[in-house]
Image (tube, rainbow, N blue to C red):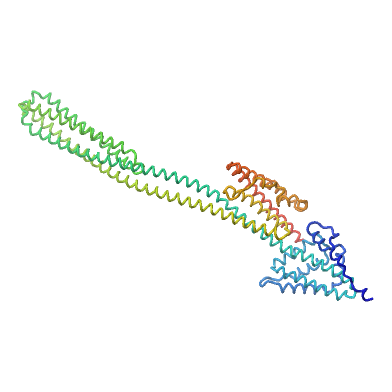
Amino acid sequence: MFNKLKPRVNIDEFLQYGTDIEVKGRFKDTLAYNHFTTEDQARLKEIVSLLESSTNEMVRIFETYLKELRTEGIENISTASIERYINIFFYEERNEEYVDKIISFFEELRTHHYNIGKLVVAFNQFNFYLITNLLSKKGQNPHKCLQFLEVLQRAINIDQQILIEVFTEKVVEQVSEGIAQLMDKNAEIMFIKGLIQSLEEQNHEIQNASAATEEISASIADVARSATHVSEKTALAVNKAENGTHVISNALDEIVHTRDTFDNIVKNFSQLKGYVSTIEDIVGLINGVADQTNLLALNASIEAARAGEHGKGFAVVANEVRKLAENTVSSVKQVNHNVQNLRAFSTEVSDSINSTSVVIEKATTEAQEALPLLTEIVEIVEEINDNTNSIAAVCEEQAAATDEISNRMASISDLSEDVRELGRNTGSAVYTLSQTIDSFRQNMINNNNILLSTKALLSLSKTDHILWKWRIYNMFLGLETINPNEVTSHNHCRLGKWYFHENTKERCGRFSSYQSLNEPHRRVHEFAKKAAEAYLAQDVEQAEGHLSNLEEASKEVLKCINELLNDLEYEKQLKKSK
């Protein structure tokens, strides 16, 4: 008789799967896995009616368990939140609203930094309290009691599963978002490609400048040699001018000494006047030479100033100085010749010299006045000689300085090459870091059988598209090889599969951010493929253009995803406030 009262365990009942509750999404799988039905919902209400008198005790016990788990320095969850959760647990229908409400409570537990493992223990202890209470209330009816215990266990299992998923998904969301930010920051280092290109251009310009500097150095050395040669010639001209002055001075002395013998000069005065006129012409020529030499000295000073920068032009002035010096020497020779003629003629008219002494005295005086002009010419030529020597010295200094500049340019070229190599190594290191981060991301998702929340999936999708831009970018650096066939359609990537899923359309289709996402997403895949094709065809310029378009489309994709995440979060907060 008593054996009939004992409930019999039917193993098949524990292995049953499925639910008759109409609900969408992942929660339906959760209900089905735990074999939670509408009948179980009804029995939960029966259970709460039995335990209604113990509601306050339930809250107190649950609160006590949570206090024991509290992290030091973190405030405990409120009693009102616990009461609200217990009411939801027993009274709410298992549907989407139920999930939203308990997730809100579980997220509150997470923000209070409760340990997930200990929370599971706390839920089990709470369940054990409910079981104990049920046994005390319904122990006399074992069969009914067993049904209640099964329902209670299923309900607790469902909530524990969702609790673990909430904590796990939040970790995945945070990790995914962190990885997305890391990859985004890594992608910001795309200036390395431009840096390397700039360094290559800079190195080319430095080499050109170095070659030009060497040419300038050679030119300055040539100018220095020319200036030295001019200086030597000018010194020779000074000596000749001084000798000419002495000759003219001696000739004048001879005229003065012989004037007493010219007594009969009157008879031949007109002819003598012609010779004197010749002397006057020579004096005029000497005056002209003095003027020209003076102007030449001015030009030489100007050109000497320029010689410090370019070392050109002085040769022309130096050549003119040489010609003027030669003219001066020629004129002096003519003077000597005329004086000799005058001396011969004086012999012929010696008898008439007394009567013409006054005229000779006057001519002698005028000739003597030319001596200071000749002296001034000598001084100017000496000054030019000094300036030429200075120019030669400056040119030598400039040549030495230019050689030093050339050496420094060579050092800068070597340094630029080192910096360029460092830039390449940095790009390679960043690329390796990105690969490591992505490998961690893939292992975390693919090897742990984690169900992704919408936020986690969108964060991962952001990383996926940042990575495509990053891979194309590294293709230009020679760090990545991309087969254009690897670039799939935007319908088949992680984001595309989620985007075109019916559940996604139903949940997000009303948001403008969702509607705006498809077109830039399509362009990301289109330009990634075109960039890979152009680069493979060695059309780097066109590939660069596609990369630029890819960057713009990628920015739009990230913008739409961020806006969609904000829309979903706003909707979630709106539901909480109701």
Q: Residue 367 appears at what percent x and percent y? A: 15, 33
Whether residue 512 sits left or right of residue 259 in the image: it is right
Q: Which residue lies furthest to the left in this view?
A: 351
Which of the 4 quarters of the picture holds residue 40? bottom right
User: Residue shown at 10%/34% (left/top)?
Assistant: 254
Whether residue 297 sits left or right of residue 411 in the image: it is left
Q: Which of 525 and 482 is in front in this view?
A: 482
User: Residue shown at 73%/51% (left/top)?
Assistant: 497
Q: Nearer the viewer, residue 518 or 416?
A: 416
Q: Residue 43 appears at what percent x and percent y? A: 87, 67
Whether residue 487 sits left or right of residue 10 in the image: it is left
Q: Residue 569 appears at what percent x and percent y? A: 71, 57
Q: Nearer the viewer, residue 204 or 94?
A: 204
User: Residue shown at 34%/46% (left/top)?
Assistant: 399
Q: Residue 6 appears at what percent x and percent y? A: 90, 73
Whether residue 72 sits left or right of residue 270 in the image: it is right
